[in-house]
Image: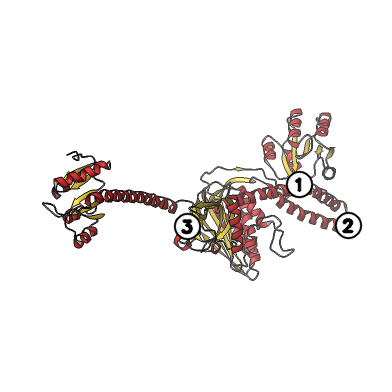
């Protein structure tokens, strides 16, 4: 029979009446459908073991078994149509329950109806196949959407959330199923119905909108979101697809960068102001010192000179703090053990903080070696302790603790290298700092204390010193519950460190003799320095800038014993003048002077043989010590 093909697309005819089987086969040929015929249920099983036909035309009564038995064995693997010579409702119901697609009685209309039924069933099967494929694709799409890393929501025109994936639920602190069906205004409270209506109209007109929003999740945690809204028109329905990205960490880094830039700018400004102020103080302090020496002790004028000098010294201390803000290095760079330094500081604090305050020590750091300046680190502790004392005017407990912490990139601020840190924590149970002031507490001149009770420099210095030690500060504070400052300093594993030159200024004024050259572009500073030195017994020449100094040195260089050289001058700088003077006479003794501290240029010149350094504003005693020390090096 032509129907004895065996390709996988053959429709299987299971019919023991060979004449009827041939009729069915010819029907299928006319429709362009290949077929294969078997006569028994057993043959059908064998054939189906190797083939997967799109449809089976199954006679109900077979020689070896009923169609019901074969259908049970196949368990729905092959779709089938049942044909029978006996019309029975019972048989029809039985076979339909077993999965039959249709039931046909072999009557006079059989030849006309079978092709139509086969066509319909095959179309239904094809449609079902497409639906299954579409359903599978939909499941894949649904899975991909649900498990996408980015938060996604579908929102209807009236603001109802039609769909939210798992990431959206996690971002908003709720399950995705909880979000579905809710109004967007429940999570973005600023999206009132009126506001959402305007947003929807803008979105519909533009097609896409990008905004940044600040929300709080169910736990109250604030998140910064980058939101992209897309307008979608699909199957006569309108939607907005929301893509939400949490940029909270990016914003933190951005804020840290802006804060670092602001602090750097403030430091530079403070340094410039302090340098110019130091030049003014130099004249005030210098002339006050001269008056004290020249006037009769105990007279009103001499007492006034003493008061002027004391006020100028206090102003000089303030400018030193301002200058500290602009420094990007440490005065010393030596290995420092934190615990012995803390013990020493605690002894000092116990004598100065007052009897109504109690210091509690909890030194748990197994590694306490850092690289830096012990005096500056001690200054950090003292400043924090004074702040803690002022936060508890009626007394209380100050806790000083240490531990070691490993910080990866996520734990350190911008521009700080990750690694192992000694964490020094100083905490109090005082009044606390309001949340809105947390971002400002390290700014210079900012203080929460009453007028006259603080300069606003303490925490600014803490920030600068710790930053210069390649560390960072974290603060926790709540009004009425106290504050805790955590100072992170990198653990140092080496043992080598360098030490900068230090000047002893505690001794009284030393007189001397010889010819000196004073070089400074500020007339008041130059004149007062020259007068101080003349009062000490020196012969003094003056130069207003680097060019005049070189001209004078070429003329009198063989007579000049030492040079007092300003570092910051217009035209020829202090560094250039230093090199030129050494070129003329390399044995010349040069004392460096600046309103700034000993920066890299000063340290370089000291290593190259400069005889000393004195920072403005200086008094007679300090200048005499430095100059005497320089002349002794001859």
Q: Which mark is residue 304?
A: none
Distance between the alpha carbons at the discs numbered 3 and 2: 83 Å
Residue 626 located left or right of residue 221: right
Q: Residues within 10 Å of mark 3 (few under 14, many from 20)?
A: many
The local secondary structure at tag 2 comes to helix
Task: Quadrant for the C terminus, please.
Answer: top right
The local secondary structure at tag 3 comes to strand
Viewer-nearest of labels 3 and 1? 3
Return the residue nearer the eye: 119 or 596. 119
Q: Position of residue 352 (x, y in %)?
A: 65, 63
Viewer-nearest of labels 2 and 1? 1
Q: Position of residue 185 (x, y in %)?
A: 56, 63
Residue labelled with disc 3:
164
Q: Position of residue 132 (x, y in %)?
A: 34, 51
Q: Residues within 10 Å of mark 2 (few under 14, many from 20)?
A: some
Return the residue nearer the eye: 463 or 548. 463
Query: Along the polypeptide, which appears first: circle 3 or circle 1?
Result: 3
Q: Quadrant of residue 311?
A: bottom right
Marks 2 and 3: in contact by CB < 8 Å? no
Return the residue nearer the eye: 295 or 49. 49
Marks 1 and 3: in contact by CB < 8 Å? no
Q: Residue at x 79, y 37 (%)?
A: 570
The local secondary structure at tag 1 comes to helix
Query: Along the polypeptide, which appears first: circle 2 or circle 1?
Result: 1
Q: Residue at x 83, y 56 (%)?
A: 308
Distance between the alpha carbons at the discs numbered 2 and 1: 29 Å
Distance between the alpha carbons at the discs numbered 3 and 1: 60 Å
Residue labelled with disc 2:
301
* Res 192 visible: no
Query: Along the polypeptide, which appears first: circle 3 or circle 2?
Result: 3
Residue labelled with disc 1:
275
């Amino acid at each position: 029979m032509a129907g004895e093909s065996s390709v996988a697309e053959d429709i299987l005819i299971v019919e023991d009446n060979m004449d009827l089987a041939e009729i069915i086969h010819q029907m299928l040929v006319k429709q362009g459908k290949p077929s294969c015929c078997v006569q028994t249920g057993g043959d059908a099983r064998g054939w189906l073991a190797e083939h997967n036909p799109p449809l089976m035309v199954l006679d109900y009564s077979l020689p070896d078994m009923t169609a019901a038995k074969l259908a049970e064995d196949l368990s729905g693997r092959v779709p089938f149509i049942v044909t029978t010579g006996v019309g029975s409702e019972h048989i029809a119901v039985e076979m339909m329950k077993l999965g039959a697609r249709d039931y046909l009685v072999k009557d006079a209309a059989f030849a006309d109806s079978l092709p139509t039924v086969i066509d319909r069933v095959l179309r239904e099967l094809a449609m079902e196949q497409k639906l299954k494929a579409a359903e599978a694709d939909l499941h894949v799409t649904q899975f991909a959407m649900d498990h996408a890393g980015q938060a996604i929501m579908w929102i209807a025109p009236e603001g109802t959330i039609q769909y939210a994936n798992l990431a959206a639920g996690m971002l908003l602190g709720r399950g995705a199923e909880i979000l579905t069906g809710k109004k967007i205004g429940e999570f973005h409270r600023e999206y009132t119905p009126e506001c959402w209506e305007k947003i929807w109209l803008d979105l519909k007109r533009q097609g896409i909108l990008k905004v940044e929003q600040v929300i709080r999740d169910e736990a109250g945690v604030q998140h910064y979101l980058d939101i992209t809204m897309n307008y979608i028109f699909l199957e006569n329905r309108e939607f907005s697809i929301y893509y939400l990205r949490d940029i909270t960490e990016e914003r933190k880094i951005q804020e840290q960068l802006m804060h670092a830039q602001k602090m750097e700018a403030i430091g530079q400004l403070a340094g410039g102001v302090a340098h110019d102020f130091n030049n003014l103080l130099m004249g005030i302090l210098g002339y006050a010192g001269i008056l004290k020496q020249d006037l009769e002790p105990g007279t009103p004028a001499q007492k006034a000179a003493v008061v002027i000098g004391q006020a100028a010294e206090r102003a000089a201390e303030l400018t030193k703090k301002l200058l500290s803000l602009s420094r990007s290095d440490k005065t010393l760079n030596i290995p420092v053990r934190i615990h012995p330094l803390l013990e020493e500081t605690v002894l000092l604090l116990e004598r100065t903080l007052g009897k109504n305050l109690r210091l509690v020590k909890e030194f748990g750091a197994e590694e306490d070696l850092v690289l830096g300046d012990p005096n500056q680190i001690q200054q950090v502790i003292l400043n924090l302790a004074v702040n803690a004392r002022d936060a508890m005017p009626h007394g209380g407990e100050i806790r000083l603790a240490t531990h070691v912490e490993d910080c990866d990139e996520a734990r350190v601020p911008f521009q700080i290298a990750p690694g192992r840190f000694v964490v020094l924590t100083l905490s109090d149970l005082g009044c606390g700092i309001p949340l809105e002031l947390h971002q400002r507490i390290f700014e210079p001149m900012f203080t929460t204390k009453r007028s006259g009770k603080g300069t606003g420099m303490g925490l600014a210095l803490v920030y600068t010193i710790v930053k210069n030690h390649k560390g960072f500060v974290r603060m926790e504070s709540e009004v009425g519950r106290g504050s805790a400052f955590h100072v992170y300093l990198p653990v140092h594993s080496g043992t080598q460190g360098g030490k900068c030159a230090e000047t002893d200024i505690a001794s009284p004024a030393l007189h001397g003799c010889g010819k000196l050259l004073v070089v400074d572009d500020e007339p008041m500073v130059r004149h007062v320095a020259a007068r101080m030195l003349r009062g000490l017994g020196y012969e003094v020449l003056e130069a207003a800038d680097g060019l005049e100094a070189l001209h004078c040195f070429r003329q009198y260089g063989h007579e000049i014993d030492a040079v007092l050289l300003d570092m910051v001058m217009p035209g020829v700088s202090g560094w250039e003048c230093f090199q030129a003077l050494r070129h003329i006479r390399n044995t010349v003794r040069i004392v460096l002077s600046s309103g700034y501290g000993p920066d890299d240029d000063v340290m370089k010149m000291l290593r190259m043989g400069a005889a000393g350094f004195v920072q403005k504003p200086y008094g007679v005693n300090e200048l005499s010590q430095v100059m005497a020390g320089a002349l002794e090096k001859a």
